[in-house]
Image: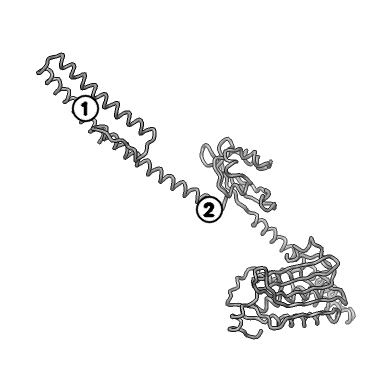
Amino acid sequence: MLLSELRHHLYLILATMIVVVVASLLTGGLQFMLISLCCLFFLWLAGYWYHLFKLVRWLERPKLRNVPQGIGIWNNIFNTLMLQARSRKKRKQKLGVALLRFNRIAETIPEGVLILGQDGHIQWLNHLAAIHLNLDAEQDNNSMLADLIENVDFRRFLDKPATESVNIKLTLENMNSGLPRVLNIIRTPFDEQATLIITQDITAAEQLNATRTAFVANVSHELRTPLTVINGFLETLTDMPDLPQEQRQSFIALMSKEGARMNHLLADLLTLSRLENQVVSSVCKQPLNLSTLAEQVVFEAEILSENKHHFICEIAADIWIEGIQQDLYNAFSNLLFNAVRYTPQYGTITIRLYSEQDENNYQQTVFQVSDTGPGIAAEHIPHLTERFYRVDSGRSRQSGGTGLGLAIAKYALAEHGGKLQIESIAGHGSTFSAVLPQMNNKVLDSSRTPA
């Protein structure tokens, strides 16, 4: 289009020159012709420089609204420039949208992504990579990655040839919590000038593996003791068939006790597994009279105590919540039976059930068990609800505990939107409080049923 216009423009100039030459020769001779041609050339040159000046000024600030207007071929040139400017603007907008979309995608990827130059400088990284590696996304950009992370194994990892994907497991400090963060870092070729580094936070997976390993070891240990006892008695009975009847009955009673202990352990394991993995619907919960449930647990605790302890009961009447009776029974009974097991003879156990308002003025119910036992040192309290955790493992086994009671209580309360609070001072007894949200009175009036 522009080429044809240029050709047409040249033809027009040539035709104009011919007309001027012929007219000048007919009217004034050769001298007049030369003067006319010079004037024509001057006018053409002035127009050329005028339009060129407008073009240069526009190129300094090329905006669509300031595209100059011209005459003849210059008008076509300016129109072509305007079309090209519009096209570049559209491409720039599309590129900006694509870049913004890429950045959003990069920020939402559940892994850290970092582009490392051939010389080891950071060319680009997303927000998660900065968090994983304790970097500043703005200040550390274009810095040497090996200088920012002081770890010998990581530097060796970066020095490996980038011809194929390699990975390393690295432990760094979490700057927010101060706890160790375990990362799986993958380095893979990106192009000839850069490599791609992907960081994955595998702390939770590592903790889960460690928990599983510890769980299997604890279960094996807990089952090994009673099985060893039973097998030992069975071998004795097999090798010595003429044992006195009284001794045989004693062996059988001990085997029965160890078998019951294994059954108790397996039942607690099944209960804890169900509480940890089950998502309980509100349909499964029913209005429950906690006052009646607490009285039932106290009655069973007094039987377990065999009159060895002094019980003080302060149970408020007619306290209702919405919940699952069996799970709350497990929580309350574990708290109270632990107090019976670990409180010395003639000690005092106080059981309270009452309602109060929390800090947000919501009504809540508290089932509280206090004892005059040996108490618990402060360093043990955060771990008491862990599976198989024991302050004194030998004493716990002698008392018949499985090491799962407080874990069951914690998950049973969490199932009902509650929590377990523990207060204890070594040598001065302990207080365990199960805090639960109380039922709305309007709901209670419309759906109350006996426990």
Percent of width and height locating residue 41: 23, 21
As drawn, is 83 to the left or to the right of 224? left
Q: Amino acid at mark 2?
A: Thr
Residue located 67% across and 42% down the image: 153
Q: Residue at x 52, y 37 (%)?
A: 193
Q: Nearer the viewer, residue 185 or 81?
A: 81
Could you tell me residue 124's position as x and y percent?
A: 54, 42
Whether the residues at callouts 2 and 1 have beta carbons within 8 Å, the answer is no
Inspect this view and state whether residue 280 appears. yes
* Residue 409 picture location, percent across and down: 71, 71
Judged from the image, the secondary structure of the residue bearing numbered disc 2 is helix
Of callouts 2 and 1, the N-terminal one: 1
**How far apart, in angstroms, are the residues tagged by discs 2 and 1?**
60 Å
Task: From the image, state whether disc 2 or disc 1 is nearer to you.
Answer: 1
Mark on residue 10? 1
Instruction: Give whichever of 41, 125 is nearer the camera.
Output: 41
On the image, numbered disc 2 is attached to which residue? Answer: 108
Residue 439, quarter of picture: bottom right
Which of the two residues, 69 or 203, is positioned nearer the viewer here? 69
Amino acid type indicated by mark 1: Leu
- Colouring mode (rainbow / by chain / secondary structure / one colour): one colour
The quadrant in which residue 430 appears is: bottom right
264 up-or-down from 296: above or below: above
